[in-house]
Amino acid sequence: MDESVTLKKLAQKFPDAVVGTHRFRGDDTVIVTKDKIRDICFFLRDDPDLLYNFMMDLTVVDYLGREPRFEVVYHLYSLAHNQRVRLKALVPESDLTIDSVVPVWIAADWFEREAYDMYGVVFQGHPNLRRILLYEGFEGHPLRKDYPLKKRQPLIGPVN
Amino acid sequence: MSEISRDLHTELMVINMGPSHPVTHGTVKFLATLEGETIVDLDVEIGYLHRGFEKMCENSTWQQVIPYTDRLNYVSPLINNTGYALAVEKLLGIDVPERCKYLRVIACELSRLADHLTNVAAAGLELGAFTAFLYFVEARELVWDLIEALCGARVTVNYVRIGGLKNDLPERFDEKVKHVFKEVRRLWKDVDKLLTKNRIFIDRVRGVGAISGEEAIAYGFTGPCLRACGVPYDVRKAQPYLVYDRMDFEVPIGETGDNYDKYLVRMEEMQQSMRIVEQALAQMPDGPINVRLPHVRMEPKEKIYTRIDSLIYHFKTVIEGIKPPPGEVYQAVEGGNGELGFYLVSDGSGKPVKCRVRPPCFALTAAMPRLVKGRLLADIVPTFDMINMIGGECDR
């Protein structure tokens, strides 16, 4: 199975959603719009030629100064075809939401919570979207490029 | 009897286990809702250890990230080093010399051995098998002697560099390996006798934390925990890196995915790791260990002091950092507890735009509620041990 199968199938099935594709150092990348992300993920998981049954990683990249500013990056792996693909969904700062893919892969649960915690991207339909590494009272999202490196937040102690 | 219990007034009880409980690594908290001793619901909070790995990397040069990577998983640090170096090399589009690849394989497998020894020892200890713990800690210390000989440090080890290694093998390393492996195999046999057919141990781990292969895949399990479910996925076999395709080794798998199978898989993997190290030592060719690219791999000090071009390269690599072309890569390696992936984004400058780690134990820890729901409170401890959660890696 070569790179084109995944890319070709996706382009065929979702012609409006696929914004671009590229291959760099052997890694396939598909850039998609965010509105169809859950359908695309279901398709990638269930299509017999693709079968991306592992959601290996989910993260966000902040391209400060570019529009759309954020990219939600999914790394998928197909055990049956021993193939990887990277899916990137563009998310603008003005509408920082995207559909959760927890219904597709349960593994997305904590990864989405982490992305929400670190970048503030809201995953719609997530069963339990709250901070995972930082405390509830923490202000801002530390992995954004405009969050100062040495900013300090008040230390919190037990209420009593 | 059931008549009586129906009339009894019972309530669910919520118990906080951790964060300062001995088995919860200092930051993790389990919020268990209990009915009697049965777990009805479990909420895992991984706490605020947060070292800010990604933020630190995004404010360092590519070379400066190396020491941060080996603090991710402090039980098998050299695998983290290797994974990061491989990812940057993929981004740069360079290939390291043959000898370097063999040495990296040796470093990785020694780390895996130390990782599994620690894990099985600690799991045994927390179930009361103190002798097994002592034996495997002794074995682990011997393996750490080898790692110390390899990279010169014992606690803050880092050995792999972008484009090469810190140093070549020390003298008479293969003799040391022979001696250590003989001892480790002896201790392995002892622990095997102590645990594998031990009634108490089996009763505590068999059938506990079981999960089916499909479900494990959906949860994103990798490494020994996935292989214990019968899914033979190993990055070293599926997408070989370095020289793993030239090594003769087997991928042990389990059937039920319970804690006993995870234990057996780890025990067998230790034997395979020792086999790989021995093969790598036997096959290793002579030659350089570093790439001859002065803008990537730092020049030797004597050259920096005596040659102007080397001095210029040195300044460039130290002050500006190496400059990979713009692009993004994902590189996976087989870590001690699963697939360890590095996702790097470069914009062509000396610092990473994004340096993301895919930690294997993050997905495993997320599945803790699924693994212990319906079991007894005491089953949390062996289940949590067997997923091998590492604080530094899990919450970065």
Image: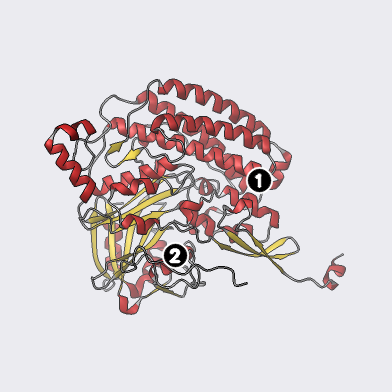
Q: Quadrant of residue B132?
A: top right
Instruction: Indicate the amino acid at tag 1.
Output: Glu
> Residue placed farthest to the left in the image?
B308
Question: Circle 2 — which element?
Answer: helix
For label 1, the SS is: helix
- Left/right placement of residue A91 relative to residue A112 reads left
Image color mode:
secondary structure
- At 42% from the left and 69% from the top, the residue drawn is A116
Q: Which residue is mark 1?
A: B126
Relative image position of residue B4 (x, y in whole percent): 87, 68
Q: Position of residue B253 (x, y in %)?
A: 53, 42
Instruction: Please give the name of the residue rendered at 40% of the width and 31% of the height, measured from the top-left corner.
Output: B150
Mark 1, other Cα within 10 Å: few <14 / some 14–19 / many ≥20: some
Residue position marked by numbered label 2 in the rendering: A114
The C terminus of chain A - image quarter:
bottom right
Assess disc 2: are there few (<14), some (14-19) or many (≥20) residues with their C-alpha within 10 Å of its C-alpha. Answer: many
Front residue of A109/B348: it is: B348
Chain of the residue on which disc 2 is drawn: A
With B29 as the anchor, is B74 left or right in this view?
left
Q: Amino acid at mark 2?
A: Glu
Please say whether residue B210 is visible from this viewpoint: no
